[in-house]
Amino acid sequence: METEIQFFSEEIDFQLEKEDLVADWVLSVVLVHGKKCGEITYIFCSDSYLLEMNNEHLDHDYYTDILTFPYSAPEDDILISDIYISIDRVKENANSLNSAFIDELHRVMIHGILHLLGYDDHETDDITSMREAENKALALRKFVD
């Protein structure tokens, strides 16, 4: 299977900067975890778009920054997924965390990948492990000014 990481936008005007470098970074994080990257599609969207998806697919009536739809299991060697990210939510989170938008966006992007790799974030210990893995992944970026 050929590696393919794609980026799209739905209902918003958003273009990810340095797409090729971001795709290489995502691939490197997957490889560090001993997996291969199949088709990973990131879809950047609005709060309302993601809220509708959250309602429709998970029966959750609240805003979220990310929804990850895995088409492979964490024990599989090749990761395949659609990952939806609310740019509205990422901007708001970046403001409230006093973080740069691009750093928060990359954190959320890799958060979805870590879910595909089997990381969870429901219990306190899981959240700590997820944050540590996010920080390690962010440290692998070589393209951020």
Image (tube, rainbow, N blue to C red):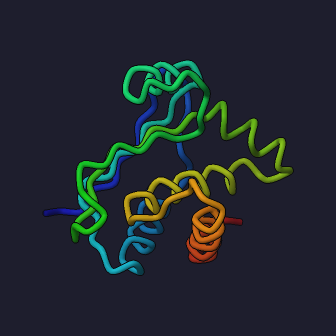
Which residue is at 22% across, 71% downward?
A: 77
**In the shown orientation, is residue 54 left or right of residue 30?**
right
Residue 103's spot in the image, x, y percent? 69, 57
Q: How many marks?
A: 0
Residue 39's spot in the image, x, y percent? 25, 53
Quadrant in which the N terminus is drawn: bottom left
* Residue 117 visible: yes
Q: Is residue 53 above or below residue 82?
A: above
Residue 102's spot in the image, x, y percent? 67, 52
* Residue 141 visible: no
Residue in front for this viewpoint, 112 or 95: 112
Residue 13's spot in the image, x, y percent? 55, 26
Q: Specify the quadrant of the image occupied by residue 53.
A: top left
Which residue is at 62% across, 49% downward?
A: 105
Q: Is residue 36 above or below residue 83?
A: below
Quadrant in which the C terminus is drawn: bottom right
Residue in front for this viewpoint, 69 or 109: 69
**In the shown orientation, is residue 5 left or right of residue 67?**
left
Which residue is at 60% across, 25% downward?
A: 62
Which residue is at 72% across, 38% downward?
A: 91
